[in-house]
Amino acid sequence: MNSSPFSTKERILGAAESLFATHGFAGASLRQVTAAANVNLAAVNYHFGSKDKLIEEVFRRRLDELNTRRLGALGTLAQKPDTTLEAVLEAYIGPALDLSRTGGGGAAFVRVLARAYAEHNETLRRFLSENYGHVLRQFAAEFQRLLPALSKEELYWRLDIVTGALTYAMADFGIIQRKNEVAEQAHREQAAEHLVRFAAAGLRAPSPHPAPRA
C-alpha cells in the first residue's frame, strides 16, 4: 500500500466522506474514520487537527473544484452582451449535476451535502458561508441584472428554492430514475434541461414584492 502523505490524506477524506454520508457528522466517529482509512488517530490529527477541520476539508475538496467551474462558466457568460437567464442557470446547475453523476465519491458527497442542510451545525454553516458565499453573491448579481423587477429579498427567496431543487436533483431522490438504455451523461443533461427550464420560469414569475424604482 502506498503510504505517501498524499495517499494517506486522500484515504482519510474518502473514508470520512463515506461515513458522514451514511451516519451524519455526529454519528461517525474519528475511530470509525481511522479504521476505514486504515490509519491511526495521529494521522488524522497531523493532517487535519480536529474533527471539525476534517469535516471542512471534506467539503473543501469538492466545493473548490465545483465553484471554480461555476465561476469560470459565469465569467465566460459575463463577456457576452446577449447572455440569457437560462445560460446563467446552466452555469450554476450544470457543474453541480456533473459532480453528482461522476465517480470517485461524487454521489457520497451529495449525501454529505444533504446532511449539511438537514443538521443544524452552525460551525459548518459559517464555514460554508465564509468560503463559498461569494459564489452565490456573484450569481445573484447576474440574476439581478437579468431580472431587475425582482427585489433583492424576493430574488434570494427564489434562489434558495432553486438551490433546494438542485440539491434534490443531485441526490437523485426523484421519481424519475435513469432508464437502463439511457446513458449517464444523457440522463444528467435531461435533468439539467428540465431544472433550468423550471428554475427560469420560477425566477421570471411576477413578483408580489417588486423592486423599488431607482
Image (tube, grey):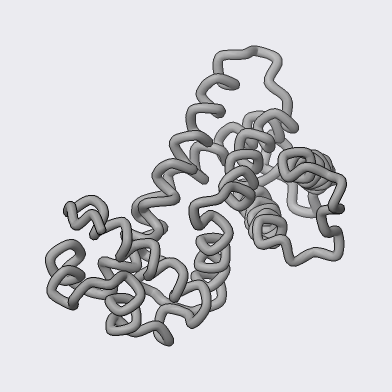
The relative height of residue 85 versus residue 45 in the rendered view (above or below) is above
| Count of numbered circles in the view | 0
- Report whether 146 appears left or right of 205: left
Q: Report the quarter where the N terminus lies.
A: bottom left
* Res 13 → quadrant: bottom left
Up the image or down, 167 lies above or below 139; here it is below
Q: In which quadrant will I find the C terminus?
A: top right
Left-right relation of 64 to 183: left
Q: Nearer the viewer, residue 149 or 146?
A: 146
The residue sitting at the front extreme is 1
Q: Is residue 196 visible?
A: no
Residue drawn at (12%, 66%), measured in percent from left and top?
46
| Image height of 157 relative to 189, above or below | below
Q: Residue at x 51, y 24 (%)?
A: 75
Residue 37 in picture, x, y percent from top left: 31, 70
Q: Position of residue 83 (x, y in %)?
A: 68, 20
On the image, the x and y values in percent for residue 7 come to 26, 54
User: Is residue 42 among what the camera can see?
Assistant: yes
On the picture, is 170 further left or further right than 50? right
Residue positioned 42% across, 44% down in the render:
134
Task: Kindly identify the residue that appears in the image at 24 percent across and 59 percent down.
Answer: 8
Location of residue 124 (image quadrant)? bottom left
Q: Position of residue 122 (x, y in %)?
A: 39, 74
State left or right for residue 2 relative to residue 27: left
Residue 106 vertical placement versus 121 (above, below):
above
